[in-house]
Image: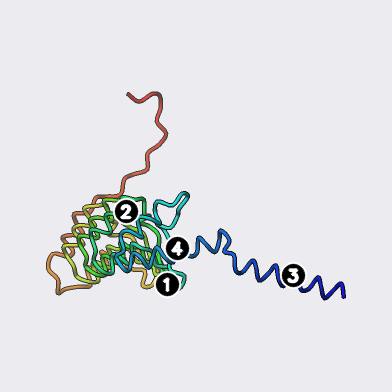
């Protein structure tokens, strides 16, 4: 009899726990609602969720794809919302499940405004995906000379090699004999800075 009562009490407690959302469940719900609001362009809901005390929803990730709000905005080529969320502290270097950053997606979509905006908010220009590809390698593969010039001007390294073929942006460019200006655009890259030794004495 005692065991039956104890079992019933445990079941009741479990049911109550499931009915009453805890902090983890509430946070999960906020994350989902935030990404949905971004997709729906619901500015009021996005702002309300961002303003909740202790909110971390701005860097929420989709549980199935790993995409965050910036990936969504790049996909729809929405420069206004992209700037808004970056100005609110969205991390431009978070990746999806394939290791692609919003910058990589912007290059893939030839979304130049998005590329410029992400770089202005400190997106890592040489951040690689799971295949070791950099945004510059992708721009060369797309034969987009304008994006190649833009990335090189922001310090992209044309010698960094991917892990799939062991080739760099320069290697891919050399194999392309159909796109004028591709190799020349890479030639404008700044040489990598030599490591500096310890500074002796005070520097004025």
Query: Which is more N-terminal, label 4 or label 3?
Result: 3
Q: Residues within 10 Å of mark 2 (few under 14, many from 20)?
A: some
Question: What residue is shown with label 4?
Answer: 31
Query: Which is more N-terminal, label 2 or label 1?
Result: 1
Q: In 3D space, how far apart are the residues under numbered discs 1 and 2 (Cα atoms)?
A: 21 Å
Q: In 3D space, how far apart are the residues under numbered discs 3 and 1 (Cα atoms)?
A: 37 Å
As drawn, is 157 to the left or to the right of 148?
right
Question: What residue is shown with label 3?
Answer: 10
Q: Residues within 10 Å of mark 4 (few under 14, many from 20)?
A: many
Is there a contact, CB below 8 Å, between mark 1 and mark 2? no
Nearer the observer, disc 3 or disc 1? 3
Along the line of sight, the residue nearer the viewer: 52 or 187:
52
| Dot 1: element | loop
Query: Which is more N-terminal, label 2 or label 3?
Result: 3
Along the line of sight, the residue nearer the viewer: 93 or 54:
54
Is there a contact, CB below 8 Å, between mark 3 and mark 1? no
38 w.r.t. 48: above or below: below
| Dot 2: element | helix
Question: What residue is shown with label 1?
Answer: 65
Residue at point 37% right, 43% down?
A: 195
Q: Quadrant of the N terminus?
A: bottom right
The quadrant holding residue 175 is: bottom left
Query: Which is more N-terminal, label 2 or label 4?
Result: 4
């Amino acid at each position: 009899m005692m065991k039956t009562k104890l079992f019933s009490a445990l079941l009741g407690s479990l049911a109550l726990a499931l009915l009453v959302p805890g902090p983890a469940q509430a946070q999960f719900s906020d994350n989902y609602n935030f990404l949905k609001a971004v997709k729906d362009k619901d500015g009021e809901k996005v702002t309300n969720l961002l303003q909740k005390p202790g909110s971390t929803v701005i860097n929420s990730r989709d549980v199935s794809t790993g995409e965050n709000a910036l990936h969504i905005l790049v996909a729809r080529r929405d420069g206004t919302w992209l700037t808004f969320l970056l100005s609110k502290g969205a991390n431009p270097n978070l990746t999806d499940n394939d290791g692609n950053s919003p910058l990589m997606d912007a290059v893939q979509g030839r979304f130049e405004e998005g590329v410029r905006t992400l770089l202005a908010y400190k997106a890592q220009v040489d951040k690689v995906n799971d295949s070791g590809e950099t945004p510059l390698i992708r721009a060369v593969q797309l034969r987009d000379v304008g994006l190649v010039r833009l990335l090189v001007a922001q310090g992209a390294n044309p010698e960094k090699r991917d892990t799939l073929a062991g080739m760099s942006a320069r290697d891919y460019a050399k194999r392309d004999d159909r796109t004028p200006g591709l190799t020349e655009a890479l030639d404008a890259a700044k040489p990598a800075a030599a490591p500096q030794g310890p500074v002796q004495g005070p520097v004025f």
